[in-house]
Image (cartoon, grey):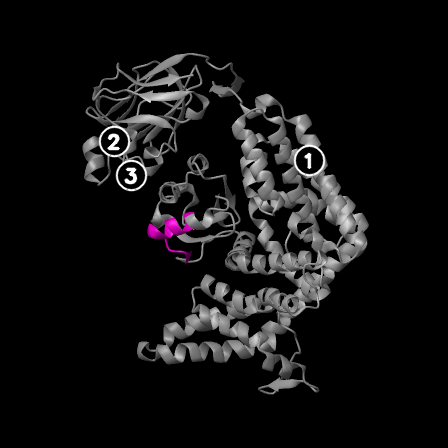
Amino acid sequence: MDYNKLASSILDQVGGQKNIEKLIHCATRLRFTLKDDNKANADAIKELRGVSGVVNGNGQFQVIIGPDVASVYDALLSLGVTGGDAGEKKEGKIWDNVLEFISSSFTPIVAVITAGGMLQVLISILAMAGVMSDTSDTYLVLYQVTQAAFFFLPIYLGYSVASKFRIDPFLGMMLGGVLVLPGMTSLLGQEGGITLFGFSVANVTYSSSVVPILLGVWFMSYIYKFADKYVPSFLKFILRPLITIAIAAPVTLLVLGPLGGRVGQVVADVMAFLMDGYAPIALMLMGAFAQLLVMTGMHYALVPILIATFTTFGYDNLIVPGMMCGLAAETGVCLAVGFKSKDPEWKQLGFSTAITSSMGITEPALYGVTLKLKKPLIAVIISGALGGLYAGITGVKAYVLIASFASLPTFMVTTANLVNAVISVAITLVAAFVITWLMVKQEDFNPKAKVAQGKTETREPLLGKEVVINACTEGATVKLSDVNDAAFSSEALGKGCAIKSSDGKIYAPADAEVTAIFPTNHAIGLTTADGIETLIHVGINTVSLKGEGFKPCVASGVAVKQGDLLLEFDDAFIQSKGFDSTVMMVVTNTDKFLDVIATDKSDVTKNDGLLTVVS
């Protein structure tokens, strides 16, 4: 994969660097916070090779890449995009902002949690296999390594949350260090308690906690920005950090830390209540909708709840078992697709995504298989509910934070717990496989459809047929690969050709229906009777002109004949504003045909063939 080319295409389609407030990434997704979501072309991004899907919601524009996300993220940074926060707070719904805050705070430390969790899985497997004794020095040392991922969570979160609020992240780490410092823990726990400025300090254990540091750094951000605003420049280096920590640490220890600890306890109590009285129903719902949470990115909002549960009880009997059923459902769907499809590409996709799903990364399967075929989503929900119901009835408990088939051996705290965990996974996987096998037909893997008169109609493929699409304007032709726009030159939007127009007029290249006229009038979509979908795009980045210099001559939904005038544009005006006025014409559903061949003529008129579509 050419990461630089993909990064360049994504950057262009999200509205350019100026439209990006923030960019972070998790294990599989680029997570953009955009100034204007309307400037992002989600449909174009979905079609890019290397992109599995797009989700826009909860305050983030998410581009699903898969395991290569870090490489694409680095390529975007090399193009000048700034990682982390890069702008002011985005306005929106309170709930969206809360979810975005939690997600962006935990995303940077997912690698730490994953490393600690998977190392726990590994040493547990080695111990159960007899390769390593759980009383050996090696095991004990490695176990302490795993605990470093969770014990120091307040420090890791202190850094990420401070970065989120655009204050010195090392002060955030220092506040986290104050909470978990062994000496502080001893002081808080000493007999008779301890006071600060005459006020009693609550004895709270902050190791592995989440909410206290979130509240503490949030408060710290106001102190930091106040000091930054009012302290003279020549004293900021000394006084700004002093004022920040001297105020934030006592307030956190006296008020916010205990409050956060109480919130964590309430969350744990609520979870205990649910699992004591409603375990089968709760786990059935969790199993059914686990992948919908992943689809929207809301699964990160469960991390604080999960950590609070583990910190209080030492295990989880809702989120991890439910997520395990969700990934088992995706695995079953993908295996069914791999075995049933006769299409080599679908076979490969099915089997490869089944493997990644079983290891706990389900986005490639969710976006590459389930949502593309649509019907398997029903299988995911039903099978996840069945597996979750069984896990709830039998009281399955997880003892590591990681949901993965590799983590199943860690359920063997008791033999019954492991057996029931395996059975719940098996029920889910088999049910998902069977339902998908029955619902998905061979034609679903290679649908042939066209859009005509606003309705979708099934069509037979045009076997052995060639259709010529004429030039949409008159002038000198340009190879698409030479166009200074990555989305077109990479053929991400389809194969085609470009023209340096000599008359500033766009004509219908074939008898067709006008299926789309962009609000800024710089682009037109057409669909022929043969189902050939053509995009005519005037200029590069001319969407920024907001319609200036363009005059549409037809409306969306009308039928046109080859040669009819569709659009007039002021070439001189466009160039005077600093934009390239090259006209691109591409077949956006190129993948439905054997090939799309561009003419080798150097100059064309509206009556000359420009593209030959072979089917």
* Residue range of the region highlighted in magenta in the rendering: 72-84
Mark pair 2, 1: CA separation: 49 Å
Is 497 above or below relative to 184? Answer: above
* Residue 330: quadrant of the picture: top right
Residue type at tag 1: Ala
Relative to the observer, which residue lies in front, 257 or 75? 75
* View extreme (front): residue: 131
Res 144 seen here: yes
Q: Rate crowding at label 3 as few (under 14), some (14 to 19) or many (20 or more) other CA atoms within 10 Å.
A: some
Lower sequence index among marks 2 and 3 = 3
- Is 483 left or right of 63, judged from the image as shown? left
The amino acid type found where label 2 is placed reads: Thr
Q: Nearer the viewer, residue 316 or 474?
A: 316
Q: Residue at label 3? A: 545
Residue drawn at point x = 43 percent, y = 44 percent: 37
Residue 582, labelled with which disc?
2
* Amino acid of disc 3: Leu
Q: Is residue 75 magenta?
A: yes
Residue identifier under label 1: 432
